Image (cartoon, rainbow, N blue to C red):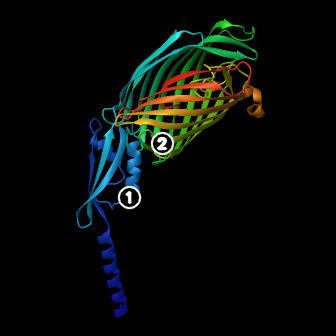
Amino acid sequence: MNFKSSLFFVLFLLMSFTISSQEKIVSKVLIKGEKKTKPQFLYNLLSLKEGQVLDSVTLDKDIVLLKRLPSVGHAFYKVIQKRNNFYDVIITIEENITINPEINFWTTTNNQFAYKLGLYDYNFLGRNITLGGFYQNNGFDTYAINFRASNLFSKKWGLAINHQNWKSEEPLYFENESANYLYNNISFEILGLFQINLKNEINFGINFFNEKYQYLSGNIRPSIPRFLDLDKVLLKFVYSYDDLDYYYQYTSGFKSVLFAQFVTSNNAFQKDFLIAWNDFFYFKRIGEKANWANRVRFGLSSNENSPFAPFAIDNNINLRGVGILVDRGTGSFVLNSEYRYTLYDKKWLAIQTNTFLDFGTWRKPGGALNDFTKSDNIRVYSGLGLRFISKKIYNATFRIDYGFRVSNNSGESKGGFVFGIGQYF
């Protein structure tokens, strides 16, 4: 090696040493503010570790991840230099209350008083595990038990187990006639949960269920069965892309969730069928106090000419003011758009006004794709609402909306109130 080569090599080593010595190294990661949540659970979720180069991009992603946890209402960080190029990272979280009762009251299609009572812990064992259930009485007894642990096995792998025994009186539509049936669904479901990265997640699994339809009242043709008892198997796949960021009651960003299901059943009346739909969400914060929120849902299923079509037109699902289970279809396109404005905002409570527009159109069972453009199938409702939001309790938003009819189809509801817990979407 000649003199010039040796000099170049020495200079290269000196420059490398100088650059590396200037890198900021994480000497310690501290989490403050946790009460019920296990600190080690939070540390295991973080990508930034002690001894690594301090990376603000990685740290920002960790903060977004923490704010998505049910137990965390808000999170932020600061960096403190300890010595030379070593720094402590202090992450502060504001923890939510996560043991929540669920109380709902409403009237059914036959004006019967109904109620739902439940209790859920969204931070069971301090590990952000959801465990709970509910009892419902709408003239019939319904119950459910739910377990979901997104990080049960590791940072990426989790498990969900659900059991439900659902009963309700539902209208089914046969061309120009309708009849009321008692619907009973008993199901057992197990799902694997896999988080690919911060923005992408898949859920997949199987659901074994039994469906019973018992005729109650109404006009039906002799060819329509008055009782059905069906054992079915449902294969489920969910893919979620989540680029949302949260700041208390405000949300920004884009999210897409694809649901795909294949249902198989050994009976002559109902064939195997596919159903898939995608929810697209877009949120934009406007100024200091406003949020523009949007959801678009498009879905299709196997196009059987059956009264048991899977997509429903309903107050609590898609169109505020339209009524309870007013129609069904084998295709659905729905747009929900609302402008949320914060009137009152203190440490524990926020109150929002809400101005919304709900648009929906359907493909009739056995119909064609141009059903989506037919005026008879289009429903438009608009309205106003209020939100009472607890900033210290997870998902504790009480909402009330009044939707009134904008479209002009005959037989439509002129409007009505819709109550619920949590934002509409």
- Residue 113 percent coordinates (x, y): 51, 10
Q: Which mark is residue 251?
A: 2
Out of 155 and 132, give the one closest to the viewer. 132
Q: Is residue 363 visible?
A: no
Q: Is residue 145 left or right of residue 324?
A: left
**Residue 320 placement (x, y as % from top left):** 59, 26
- Is 84 placed above or below 333 here? below
> Can you tell which quarter of the image residue 216 is in?
top right
Q: Of helix, strand and loop, which one carries label 2? A: strand
Residue under numbered circle 1:
56
Residue 329 screen position, x and y as percent: 69, 26
Quadrant in the picture for the N terminus: bottom left
Quadrant position of residue 210: top right
Nearest to the observer: residue 65 or residue 75: 75
The residue sitting at 41% across, 47% down in the picture is: 64
Q: Is residue 377 left or right of residue 197?
A: right
Residue 241, placed above or below residue 360 = below
Q: Residue at x 76, y 26 (%)?
A: 376
Residue 223 at x, y percent in the picture = 75, 11
